[in-house]
């Protein structure tokens, strides 16, 4: 079975909180190199997850790395939580709150439903300044961390489905199905703006990517155990 990783395999990982996508790729690659006793092996991911997000990370090895562009094109589904009333520069908890006094008392089920409908379908979205978007050969987050202002170009995204729950208000739990390249942090920020209450993404989990589901995924440790158990 271990040879499958070298010839070509799709590896579905439940990415843990705090890990970058490259952390996971590097961990898988290092263990494969040790077991296969090769100097190098192609390993790559089909769509980044932020360190503060968990869930489905699709990784390809060997010849399956050629499928990465195709796999990245699939729609994604996420669940998570948006906190109303506060904002951060990064639109999530990577940075500290900069505004904490937005009003939330006026937010009703009716207002939330009206806002929700405005997000459905194709739209232009402005990515967060704290993102890996390239601007003049440099990552946008590098400019942001240096305190430099940059203009983020809007991109076209599509929201297939978007459900919201006020059961834990002012935290709004959601599930969203969207096209590749959609920044859920921007959705949180823009929803807060639409509600006149400010919004910050405080939890995110990817549950589906294309035809793949989180139910099919193993943890990093489970994959390492599987790889190591096939070393003989």
Image (tube, rainbow, N blue to C red):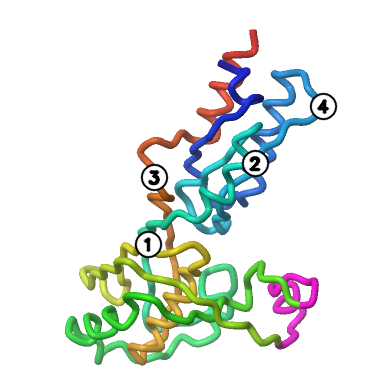
Q: Distance between the residues labelled 3 and 2?
A: 21 Å
- The residue that appears at 75% across and 72% down in the rendered structure is 142
- Residue denoted by label 1: 80
119 in magenta: no
Relative to residue 148, is residue 100 drawn left or right? left
Which of labels 3 and 4 is toward the front?
3
Image coordinates for residue 205, horizontal then vertical, percent: 42, 55
Q: Which residue lies furthest to the top in this view?
A: 232
Dot 2: what SS? helix
Which tag, 3 or 1, sits closer to the chain's start? 1
141 in magenta: yes
Residues tagged 2 and 4 counted as in contact (Cβ below 8 A) = no
- The residue that appears at 75% across and 85% down in the rendered structure is 148
Q: Quadrant of residue 211?
A: top left
The local crowd at label 1, few if under 14, some if 14 to 19, many if 20 or more residues have their Cα within 10 Å, is many
Q: Distance between the residues labelled 3 and 1?
A: 20 Å
Instruction: Give the answer, above or below, for where 109 lies relative to 159.
Output: below
The local crowd at label 4, few if under 14, some if 14 to 19, many if 20 or more residues have their Cα within 10 Å, is few
- Residue denoted by label 4: 39
Which tag, 3 or 2, sits closer to the chain's start? 2
Which of labels 2 and 4 is toward the front?
4
- Residue denoted by label 2: 25
How many tags in the picture? 4
Which tag, 1 or 4, sits closer to the chain's start? 4
Image coordinates for residue 52, horizontal then vertical, percent: 53, 58
Relative to residue 71, is residue 6 drawn left or right? right
- The residue that appears at 79% across and 77% down in the rendered structure is 136
- Residue denoted by label 3: 211
Relative to residue 98, is residue 164 drawn left or right? left
Residues in magenta? 136-149
Instruction: Give the answer, above or below, for where 101 lies relative to 217.
Output: below
Which tag, 3 or 4, sits closer to the chain's start? 4
């Amino acid at each position: 079975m271990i040879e499958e990783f070298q010839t070509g395999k799709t590896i579905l990982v439940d990415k843990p909180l705090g890990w970058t996508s490259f952390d996971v790729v590097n961990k898988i690659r290092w263990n494969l190199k040790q077991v296969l006793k090769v100097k190098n092996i192609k390993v790559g991911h089909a769509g980044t997850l932020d360190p503060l997000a968990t869930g489905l990370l699709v990784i390809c090895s060997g010849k399956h790395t050629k499928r990465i562009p195709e796999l990245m094109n699939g729609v994604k589904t996420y669940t998570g939580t948006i906190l109303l009333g506060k904002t951060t520069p990064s639109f999530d908890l990577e940075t500290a709150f900069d505004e904490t006094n937005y009003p939330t008392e006026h937010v009703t089920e009716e207002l939330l439903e009206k806002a929700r409908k405005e997000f459905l379908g194709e739209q232009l979205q402005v990515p967060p300044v704290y993102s890996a978007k390239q601007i003049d050969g440099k990552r946008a987050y590098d400019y942001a961390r240096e305190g430099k202002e940059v203009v983020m170009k809007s991109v076209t995204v599509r929201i297939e489905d978007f459900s919201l729950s006020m059961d834990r208000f002012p935290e709004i739990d959601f599930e969203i199905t969207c096209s590749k390249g959609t920044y859920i942090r921007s959705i949180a920020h823009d929803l807060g703006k639409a509600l006149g209450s400010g919004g910050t993404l405080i939890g995110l989990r990817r549950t589906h990517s294309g035809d793949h589901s989180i139910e099919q995924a193993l943890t990093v440790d489970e994959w390492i155990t599987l790889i190591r158990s096939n070393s003989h």
